[in-house]
Image (cartoon, rainbow, N blue to C red):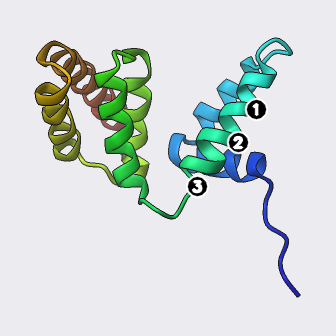
């Protein structure tokens, strides 16, 4: 007998929790409203249930790609969240540095420089939380 697969939404929420952590997802879910519910469902199914749940790339590589794309497109507000997620995806600080070097060459030094500053500050916050 075949085991039923999870829906895209359920798989997405499972992957999202694995990558971002329960506390992050719990805070985001608590802040969800009727207004943004369709968008949140789209993200859960599309980003987390399809792209991040695909077996085509490991989560480490997806972290590196996501951070590079966020930096290259100037979407800096999500970089700290994905740097924090790197602790669960296996992308190292060195991996992230390498990704941002690609951004510098192919998308622009100012974008990579800003992304590096955000990553550095986030890693310091993460270290301080562990040291407390």
- Residue annotated with mark 2: 45
The label number, if any, that marks residue 53 in the structure image: 3
Q: Residues within 10 Å of mark 2 (few under 14, many from 20)?
A: many
Q: Nearer the viewer, residue 17 or 106?
A: 106
Up the image or down, 125 lies above or below 89; here it is: above
**Is 54 left, or right, of 41 in this rendering?**
left
Q: Which of 24 and 69 is in front in this view?
A: 69
Q: In this view, does 15 lie to the left or right of 62?
A: right
Q: Position of residue 36 (x, y in %)?
A: 76, 16
Q: Determine the CA span between mark 1 and mark 2.
A: 6 Å
Alpha carbon separation for disc pair 3 and 2: 10 Å
3 and 1 marks in contact (CB < 8 Å): no
Q: What residue sits 69% from the left and 38% below the top?
A: 44
Instruction: Please name the residue shown 41% across and 60% down the image.
Output: 58
Q: Do the residues labelled 1 and 2 touch (CB within 8 Å)?
A: yes
How many other residues sit within 10 Å of disc 1, few (<14), some (14-19) or many (≥20)? some
Image vertical order of residue 51 relative to residue 106, above or below: below
Decide if residue 116 is on the left or right side of residue 82. left
Residue drawn at (35%, 20%) of the image:
73
Label 3 SS: loop
Q: Please provide percent x and percent y for residue 119.
A: 26, 26
The residue sitting at 15% across, 12% down in the picture is: 110
The kind of secondary structure element at disc 2 is: helix
Which mark, by number, is residue 5? none
Q: Residue furthest bottom?
A: 1
Quarter of the image that includes the N terminus: bottom right
What label does residue 41 carry, if any? 1
Q: Position of residue 32 (x, y in %)?
A: 76, 20
């Amino acid at each position: 007998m075949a085991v039923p697969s999870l829906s895209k939404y359920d798989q997405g929420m499972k992957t999202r929790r694995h990558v971002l952590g329960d506390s992050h997802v719990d805070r985001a879910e608590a802040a969800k409203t009727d207004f943004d519910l369709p968008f949140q469902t789209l993200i859960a199914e599309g980003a987390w249930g399809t792209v991040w749940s695909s077996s085509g790339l490991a989560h480490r590589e997806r972290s590196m790609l996501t951070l590079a794309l966020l930096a290259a497109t100037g979407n800096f507000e999500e970089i700290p969240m994905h740097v924090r997620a790197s602790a669960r995806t296996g992308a190292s600080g060195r991996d992230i540095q390498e990704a941002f070097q690609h951004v510098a060459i192919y998308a622009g030094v100012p974008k990579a420089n800003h992304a590096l500053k955000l990553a550095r500050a986030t890693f310091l916050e993460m270290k301080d939380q562990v040291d407390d």
